[in-house]
Image (spheres, rainbow, N blue to C red):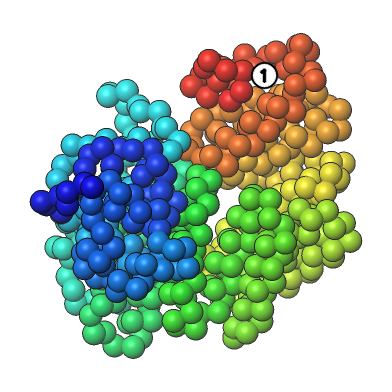
Amino acid sequence: MPKPPRSKELPVSLLTAPVMIEACRARDFGRIFQLVKARAGIYPSMIARRCDLTPSRVGEVIAGRRQLLHMDVIERISDGLHIPGHMLGLARRSWEAPTSLTVAPREPAEAPPPSAEPPAAGLPGADVDSILALAAERDLSPSTLDALHSSIEDYWRRDDEHGGETLRPAVVGRLRYVVDLLKEQRPAPMRASLHSIAAELARLTGWTYFDARQYNQARAYFTESLGLAKSIEDHQFMANVLACMSLQATYQDKPGDALALVTAAQDQARTAVGTTPRVLAMLAMREAFAHATLGNHSATHTAISEAHTHFGRIGTADPDPAWVAYFDEPKLIVDTGIAHGRLGEAALAEPLIADALRREHRTNHRGRAFHAFWLARTQLQRGKLDEACHTAMDALVPAAAVSSQRVAGHLREFYEQLEPFRREPAAVAFESRLREVLPRRVSGSPRP
């Protein structure tokens, strides 16, 4: 039987064990508690004391009868067991010394050469974010809240340009800062604003995990965001979060879940006062995605029609929430094309996606890469091999500029669809260009 450690530190051998890394990535606290007991001699009653939990709650988690999703609880577990913050998707904890332990991620990331600038240069790290939070004024003003909202808009812009991996530590740090502010007594209007900001930051964090295809972590943050929005009865934003979760379900090949979630989102939107046509159009398009993934042609076409009808009702005086501004006309068109593409209606999808791609903003690297691979797939389905390979080659440059497992997944799917044409000149040229632009994606294997 292992002896209990004298300090709070977990053994390095446990923190670097693949099974522990995976359990932390998935936030599988039942497994984490079992490993801590077996390999560090820290028993459930001690876990409960360290993490400010009840012994019965710890027992329920270990037995698989309870999940721990609330951010405050996750932070207490990190602090109580001294699990480094990054292992649980948190910012660096206050007790962490400068990095002396490297824990390998589930999906190894390529380290840039020492002289290379990071993709999102100028972003503060999690440790700097924490220092700034401590130094910040605690007496909030309206201008401070405006600045927090503006920082979220900037995070979303950087997410489009670079992907979410580089942003996540700063976003989580800012989320922790806002959650800390909520622990203090504030006037009701200010508390409502802080809840709104925290909900947006939690959704953004969930989105970065979704884009990295780390679905368990994404769902945890989306759930946190949903709870924050519910606490202030922001039904429009609750609809937004549920729509994100619906989209994730389509990627997980769970179309039934996707349809249930978007239906709940539409229910929330109908409950809200003043839900705008743009929000309703976005939700109808998410419904179309769910129906298309189920292969239901008539329901998909009906939802697409509803999306366009709602979009046609948008007026200049509509007070759209900032978080739905991205759903502009090119986005409506490209999503319509993708919905048709999911149904296998390539002849309808191709011109729509091509038109939207021509109008899409050049700085949206992820969107351009994502939509270009969709266009290449539809062109290939129509027998246009040369055009498809040319489109895919154009997509490689924005794909190389952004860290996104979703984009990488679409690249992989297109590459696999080229298998029957591997000896054709257009396919040979594409593979050569792929190895030139993204050599690390294909080195040692023909698959990106």
Where is residue 156? Give x, y as percent: 46, 54
Q: Which residue is mark 1?
A: 430
Query: Going 76% across and 11% down the picture, which residue do you hit?
Result: 423
User: Which residue is painted at 51% across and 30% down in the image?
Assistant: 400
What is the x, y in percent for residue 194? 35, 75
Q: Which residue occupies the extreme left position in the image?
A: 6
Q: Is residue 385 left or right of residue 177?
A: right
Q: Is residue 200 visible?
A: no
Residue ID at (79%, 68%): 306
Q: Quadrant of residue 148?
A: bottom left
> What SS does tag 1 mark?
helix
- The answer to whether residue 365 is above or below residue 434 is below
Whether residue 323 is situated above or below residue 9 in the rendered picture: below
Of the pair 22 and 31, the residue shown nearer to us: 31
User: Where is residue 272 shown, x and y percent of the image?
Assistant: 59, 83
- Neighbor class of circle 1 (other Cα within 10 Å; few <14, some 14-19, many 20+) is many
State the image quarter where residue 183 is shown: bottom left
The C terminus appears in which quarter of the rendering? top right
Q: Residue furthest front?
A: 1
Specify the amino acid type for callout 1: Phe
> Residue drawn at (26%, 37%), measured in percent from left and top?
13
Is 71 placed left or right of 225 in the picture? Answer: left
Q: Residue furthest bottom?
A: 188
Whether residue 389 is visible: yes
Residue 345: image x %, image y %?
A: 86, 45
